[in-house]
Amino acid sequence: MLPYLHSSKFTKFGGKTGGKTRTVDGGKMKLTKTICNNLKPKDRPYKKFDGGGLYLEVMPNGNKLWRVKYYFHGKEKRVSLGKYPIVTLAEAREKRMEARQLLAKGIDPSRNKISKEKLARRDNNNIFETLAHEWYSKKKDGWSSSHAKNVMHRLESNVFPYIGKTPVTKITVPDLLDVLQVMEDRNALEVAKRTRQICSQVFRYGIQTGRCENNPALHLDGALKTHRPKHFAALDVKDVPGFLTALERNEARLFSRTRRAIRLSLLTFARPVEIRKSRWPDIDLDQGQWAIPGERMKSGRDHIVPLSAQSLDVLLEQQKETGSHDTPWVFPGQVYPRKPMSGGTVNMGIKRLGYDKRMTAHGFRALARTAIREQLKYYPDIIEAQLAHKPSGPLGAAYDRAQFLDERRTMMQDWADYLDKIALGAVSKAI
């Protein structure tokens, strides 16, 4: 026997009222909007039935609550349908019909409602923004502070305002494409590319933790505009002697510390931010070694820079000028020595030397990478280790800050000596 909704015996009064037959439930008329509006609270809750198990329960505080009484496997049960007048009489009757349909299928309306509410709560906890913050908290400790800041900035600026409050299970490929095309429309193509990669990692984490089953970012290949990557301008080796001559003559009248920062950039080919934020506590002049903490590295890993004799000369000169200042920075700002040199100082210095659009602070890395491989014949893995690039394959898995350290010490001195030689014109004209 199927479960059923409670229903009193229906009686039709044969008398006509305005030409219509009145239907009653248990001797009472079905509810109307007027009746519902006029129901007044009493000292105790009371019920007004509409039929088919549907009734309106009036509470002492004046609230009017829709409920349906039914039987499931022989037990009397009730399910709440909402508050009147937020849920109208017509809507309550529709919900009663839905309950009947569930009962006809052998489904308990009350249990079905609880399941839907649990699903709704789960979806609310699995909105993209919540999932992204959880993924970010697990990853950020392995990143440099600047990279972590960039990741969160891209999420907060470009993603959260659009799909942040949407459950991850409901975000479709077109939804994510719309978000990325906002960046594309302002010609921020690289930002759109990076943001897609971040979103892909968030969705992958959602799949791994059972929050979703699909990664829409994976289906966007070819959907975004692409552009030819712009590489940092870098000199050819044959142009280095002229550059060093211009730096030595200093007709541009650069500050001494700016010239030293440029020269140290060439000698160590560290990233510009690593040069300008270098600190005396990290440099061991006696051991000829510069240990950069992971929080200041793009990779998030500690990194050692072996210092050539020429690099040590630059640092000793710099120490004489600024070492007495109350600042930890190797290259303090000219105006505000308690802060590091500004980000554009080296690039501006290069420009004033006459190498605008031909060289950048970051270009020293490309210059060294090419020249050391082609002219000094060092293995790429040793060069990549000094560039703080994590190599692929088995070497990548074994990476640590001291990888190839002995080889790199020799390489850095060879590189500094090579620069001295080409500055004096002692390298073959075949270069």
Image: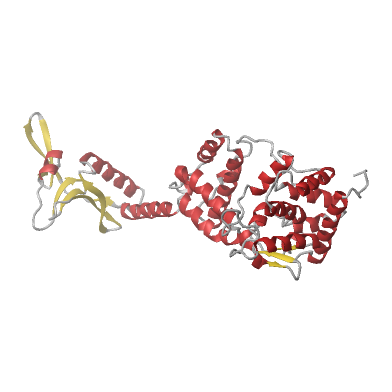
As drawn, is 242 to the left or to the right of 11?
Answer: right
Instruction: Tell me, yes or no, if residue 314 can be seen here.
Output: yes
Task: Identify which residue is drawn at 7% across, 32% down.
Answer: 16
Q: Looking at the image, which is closer to me, 235 or 324? A: 324
**Location of residue 381 with respect to 224 vertically, above or below:** below
Image coordinates of residue 403 in percent, x first then y, are 76, 64
Image coordinates of residue 120 in percent, x first then y, are 39, 51
Q: Quadrant of residue 325?
A: bottom right
Image coordinates of residue 8 in percent, x first then y, are 17, 49
Task: Identify which residue is drawn at 72% across, 57% down.
Answer: 388
As drawn, is 221 to the left or to the right of 120?
Answer: right
Residue at the limit of the structure toward the bottom, as seen here: 286
Q: Looking at the image, which is closer to me, 222 or 142? A: 142
Q: In which quarter of the image is the C terminus?
A: top right
Instruction: Tell me, yes or no, if residue 52 can be seen here.
Output: no
The image shows a total of numbered marks equal to: 0
Task: Identify which residue is drawn at 51% across, 43% down.
Answer: 158
Q: Looking at the image, which is closer to me, 267 or 295? A: 267
As drawn, is 3 to the left or to the right of 273?
Answer: left
Colour mode of the rendering = secondary structure
Q: Looking at the image, which is closer to me, 294 or 180? A: 294
Image coordinates of residue 397 in percent, x first then y, are 72, 62
